[in-house]
Amino acid sequence: MEIKVDKKINIKGLVCPYTFVKSKLAIESMEPGEVLEIILDYPAAATNVPRSMEDQGHKVLKTEKVNDTDWLIVVQKGRE
C-alpha cells in the first residue's frame, strides 16, 4: 500500500537531540492523521526518533535503512 506523505524533512548532518527536536517541531505543525517523512543519517537517531515519536503518541509507519548512511522514517501524527 502506498503511503501518502504530507510533509518531508531532511535532517542529515544533525545528531541527537536535534534530530528529535526538528522532527517534533515538524510534526507539531501538522494535522492529526497527516504523515511526516524524515531522512536522517545519524545511526542513534534511527532508533531514538521513532521511539520518541511513539512516546509522543504518534504512529511510526516505517523505519528503513535506504543506503549505507541514510534512514527513512515515516510517522503518522496521532490524535491530540
Image (cartoon, rainbow, N blue to C red):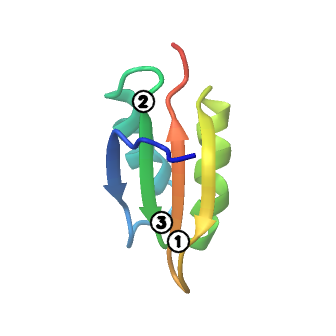
Q: Are marks 1 and 3 in contact (CB under 8 Å)?
A: yes
Quadrant location of residue 63? bottom right
Q: Which label is found at residue 42? A: 1
Which of the marked residues, 1 or 3, is nearer the chain's N terminus?
Answer: 3
Single out the mark in the foreground, 2 or 1.
2
Q: Position of residue 72 (x, y in %)?
A: 51, 62
What amino acid type is highlighted by mark number 2?
Glu
Marker disc for residue 15: 3
Residue type pointed to by label 1 = Tyr
Rendered image: mark on residue 59: none
Image position of 67 with respect to 14: above or below = below
Residue 8 pos. (x, y %): 33, 50
In terms of secondary structure, where does tag 1 sit? loop
Q: Is 18 in front, or is 26?
A: 26
- In-image side of 80 versus 5 (left or right): right
Q: Nearer the viewer, residue 18 or 67?
A: 67
For the point 53% across and 71% down, which residue is it? Answer: 42
Residue at mark 2: 34
Residue 22 position, x and y percent, is: 38, 48
